[in-house]
Amino acid sequence: MTRAAVVVILVVVSVVLGGQRSSATNAVAPERTLRVCADPNNLPFSNQKREGFENRLAEIVAAELHARVAYTWWAQRRGFVRNTVKAGACDVLMGVPVGFDMTLVTKPYYRSSYVFVSRRGDHVHVRSLDDPVLRRVRVGVQLVGNDGQNTPPAHALAARGVIANVVGYTLYGNYVDPNPPARIIEAVARGDIDIALVWGPLAGYHAPRQSTPLDIRPVTPQIDRTRMPLAFDIGVGVSRAHPELREEINAVLKHKQAEIARLLDEYGVPRVVAPAQGGAHAR
Amino acid sequence: MAAKDYANTRFSGLTQITTANVSRLQPAWSFSTGVLRGQEAAPIVVNGTMYIVTPYPNIVYALDLTKPGAPLKWKFNPKPDASSQGVACCDTVNRGAVYSNGKIIFNTLDDHTIALNAESGAQIWNATLGDINRGETITMSPIVVKGKVLVGDSGGEFGVRGWVTALNESDGSMAWRAYHTGPDKDVLIGPNFKPFYQDHQGKDLGITSWPPDQWKIGGATMWGWISYDPTLDLIYYGTSNPGPWNAELRPGDNKWACTVFARRPETGEAIWAYQYNPHDLFDHDSINEHLVLDLQINGQMRKVLVHPERNGNMYVIDRQTGEVLSAEPFAYTNTSEGVDLRTGRLKYVEAKEPKQGKVIRNICPPEPGAKDWQPTAYSPKTGLVYIPHQNLCQDMEGTEVSYIEGTPYVGANVKMYAGPGGNRGVFSAWDPVHAKEVWSVKENFPVWSGTFVTATDVVFYGTMDGWFKALDAKTGNQLWQYKVGSGIIGQPITYKGPDGKQYVAVLSGVGGWSGAIVAGDLDAGDPTAAMGFVNAMADLPKASTKGGTLYVFSLP
């Protein structure tokens, strides 16, 4: 990833959400534009080469809406939503958690959870946050630093008094490196830490790409004893200015459910069933 | 320098403007910076020229005071990396430049320190001190001591490791860097380090007072003020809060966050240190200014530092040893009950300690503290410290679903609101010898501007709704006010022009953390935006629009 990739590229496109016919004579150009804001450097979600599953999902949605995708790239850090959707630069974010209140959110298209990542050769079959092994080995968690809060596993371990053997990794990393949040997975493969607790899609994609075989197991329970969730439903974030677009995307997500499931499988996104539906384990 | 003198007093000996004639003060000229973000800088006046640094993109303007209307002499645009806007915490402010030996030296948000020829605006050197891609930024105003340009970093929110760096004034090369976490050799702690309190003594406390390796991302940056005492040859500054914010994740004192250091300017060697907030619970950075004063304490002349701390206490510290002589609340606080003067430790109130899954109401002072970066002034004539500050409290619970870097988590739902009395801001005069308030003026909005005081006992400050005010420094009686275009969060100054007349100057342009709702176009319907500050500032957009204008005043 070059430094140029982090420079914000403002893609200037016209808002043609109503789908009215363009007055342009070029008959080949789609008449609609799906304006997406995305991080240019954060696989498996998105990158500027459009290699992430969120990039692919955007293409699926756009095709159904007879639209073309136009991106505004912006690091998904503090101020991301404010500087993108809220600033009117785009209409959708391809992944946000249900309950996120800075945008409208569609129905979820997947539910994942935080997972344990360990070296296969270590035979650490940890599934529970209460497993005593978490007190004995070096455990890595990611730290947010925004909002005075941190990732749910960091809090869950602290609540259990598991601190002295916990190593914090900044979620942000160095933005000139590719996919900065992936450093913690590499740390497990390298042996710097024994277990990492990270968000499922990040692990599902990066773990198989390490030279050391790694195992992934969803964290239980999904809702921790402090009522903090470790599993989240993810939908598409839609600008509050376009409630009708949310309904259109909801229809696409339903219609293309099987294709989207295949897409998520391709990227190794671990999915879990909500406890209310009887499942605490990976599908 | 932005702080007027090494002692950080912001006291002016000019006498033309007095309590008797200040009511006739009127606008002389103005200048638009062309940047509509929070204007926190102090204008610098040297040799008939005024220098201003804007917020990001950190343009420097030189204005010719020898000509009517102060026309532009030169302009320098450093063109900082655009991505720094995406990764910088808070508003993209800059707190001003410093003049030294024919050079104007300033910092950019993307971690450069740049020296310009003050006469021509030509770049002399340009040093890179940090990496924006790691979350490091610079917003502070540098100072120059004995040929060393002293600079600190910002970005504790992103898990950076804080430092202060000295550059050689001649060529911008690095002379030394002192980290604020990690091993003693990195903190520049050596055999001459003699902290006053026992729990500050011991090897590598910057490692051992943290969970393993956490010091590597432990924050403790330095984005505030540095002062200097030439007689003792020591610089003084305080470090920011430790990271991560959640205190539960970092058991231990987390040294050397929230700590004042005394160091040798030429080598950076630490001589003593004192930690204001061991194991900080509330994001209470200790980067506020340290006034270098000689005061009669209990009948004895003492060389002291006076420090209004974010935790709400006014500290008086022996600046030779680091002993706390007194620490009394200058604002309402219910999160701590003073300092144990025997051990030096702040006495936290347990009920207010943030814990995961626990809702805590009425935390006073909240994250920005009883006073944030906005610098105080001291008048040797009145013997009083003038404190622009806020009066806020907050509720805190972890309930808001957030998403960063593709990773969901539950953010803290923080809401700030006015403290006791209902006013959000206060401008007060404090007697540091008797450790008590002498007078205070309530302001509707937090007082986020700097201040200065003159030998004729006139003290100036600005409000976030755009009133620039002059008060009688002895009584607090208001003598004059003028409504400027946008709210004031800058540092006012006074200077004698080439025509021999005394002028007063201030930048207008609301923003900063408190004013982010206007400068950053935040949604008033989202009370937790700007880390909960928006809840307290929902009415600011009605009181002030964005701005970026310098105003200069004089007598007719």
Image: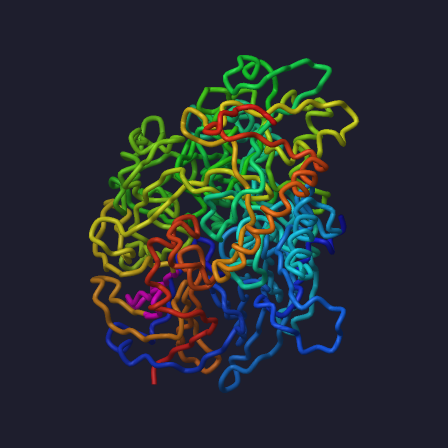
Vertical placement of B457 versus B187: above or below? below
Of the pair B294 and A40, the residue shown nearer to us: A40
Q: Position of residue B213 (x, y in %)?
A: 59, 27
Q: Residue at x 48, y 34 (%)?
A: B272
Residue found at the very far right of the displayed protein: A211
Determine whether, in the image, residue A50 is placed left or right of residue B69. Answer: right
Instruction: Confirm whether residue B249 shows in the render.
Output: no
Q: Position of residue B452 (x, y in %)?
A: 37, 63
Quadrant containing the C terminus of chain A in the rendered view: top right
Determine whether, in the image, residue B475 is placed left or right of residue B211. Answer: left
- Where does the magenta region start and end? B449-468
Vertical placement of B92 versus B204: above or below? below
Q: Position of residue A253 (x, y in %)?
A: 59, 47
Query: Is residue B454 found inside the magenta-colored segment of the image?
Result: yes
Quadrant of the rendered structure where residue B425 is? bottom left
Q: Residue at x 29, y 39 (%)?
A: B361
